[in-house]
Image (cartoon, grey):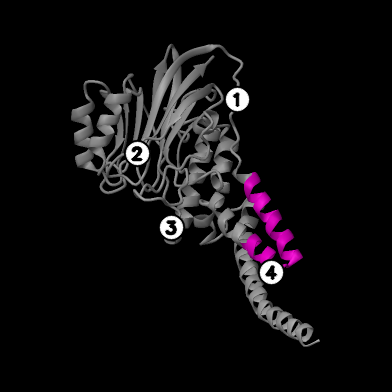
Amino acid sequence: MATTQQRQTQQQASSSRRRPARAVAALAAAALLAGTTAVTAFRVADADGPTPVPQLLAFLPWLAVPAGLGLLGALLARRRVLAVWGAALVALLAWYTVPRGGDHDPAGSPVADLRVLTANLQFGQAVGPLVDLVRQERPDLVFVQECDPACMDALTSRLTATHPHRRAVAGGGPVGSVIHSRLPLTAAAGVPASMGQPGAVIEVAGHQVRLQLAHPSPPIPERLTTWRAELEDLRHWAGERAAAGNAEAVAEDTPVILAGDFNASRDHAAFRRLLDDGGLNDAAALAGAARRATWPVTGAPAPGVQIDHVLVSPAFTARDARFPAMEGSDHRAVLVTLTLHR
């Protein structure tokens, strides 16, 4: 009898100790799930929301970590409602994270290939690695962001033999941008922005192709309005297939390559509107690399996001997307082979 009573007493004591632990686990799970749900709700609503939502939406796939921890806490706490909430949230995040866009098949026959490289040099600090990359990979077009005057001079002198044609917007710090090309460039008005966004036209096997470099403002709290406006301007430009109403505008159905550091991922509503309303495809997605991170490159394992893109009109297919690191820059370059179709 005494043994039975002792066992019952021990069980009651153990149960009493578990109750506070489960309560703490349930509270922590609810907090994690609530915070993650609040951000994910803006993705569901197709909106970017106020700070800090746009900054967190960039890392939407990584929200599966707090959501998964919330689910684990709910299971440990034996809270059925929390567990169902956590499972549904993890499933929703997984659905949004699954890469899409690799089944594009233009009806026209292939005309020519173009190798396109876009690179953010972080205030011109990665000039040498970019030059080495260009000489090694031999892209036809090179879109460069954050290239200050010294960077411009270095690229002009070191790429003259292979990429003598250029269109640039000069500026210090992150403002300067340039397009270098193996093929002749015709002037075209770029899309105005707080950082340089030059434009041009090239001819590929008798077909005109409109080029536009993209570098809208980053979505930091004090520049969030500018970020939205400059992505909207790019969306408007892409929808018109013209150089912002300028007399240099090319024909509406001219194929387009819009490349650069967009400071936005596919989880931002503003970027999705640019794709949809502009009738554009992400070349990395077409090549099966929609979620490969391009920023930040810190040298240590860290959550990353793809904010550098090569966007193309439906006349293009894409393959062989690669993301080389460049010493001195916190961005990876994007290198992709495009095929222009009739």
Q: Which residue is mark 1?
A: 104
Measured in 3D between alpha carbons, the distance from the residue under mark 1 to the one under mark 2, in whole angstroms, is 28 Å
Tell which residue pokes out farthest to the bottom in this image.
2
Sequence order check, earlier mark of 2 and 4: 4
In the rendered view, does 38 fall on the left or right side of 168? right
Query: Which kind of residue does numbered mark 2 sit on?
Result: Ala
Crowding near the residue tagged with mark 4, few <14, some 14–19, many ≥20 C-alpha atoms within 10 Å: many
Mark 1: which secondary structure? loop
Nearest to viewer (mark 1 / mark 4):
4
Q: Which residue is mark 3?
A: 220
Mark 3: which secondary structure? loop
Which quadrant holds residue 103?
Answer: top right
In the rendered view, does 64 fall on the left or right side of 215? right
Query: Which kind of residue does numbered mark 3 sit on?
Result: Ile
Measured in 3D between alpha carbons, the distance from the residue under mark 1 to the one under mark 4, in whole angstroms, is 46 Å
Q: Which residue is mark 4?
A: 77
Measured in 3D between alpha carbons, the distance from the residue under mark 2 to the one under mark 4, in whole angstroms, is 44 Å
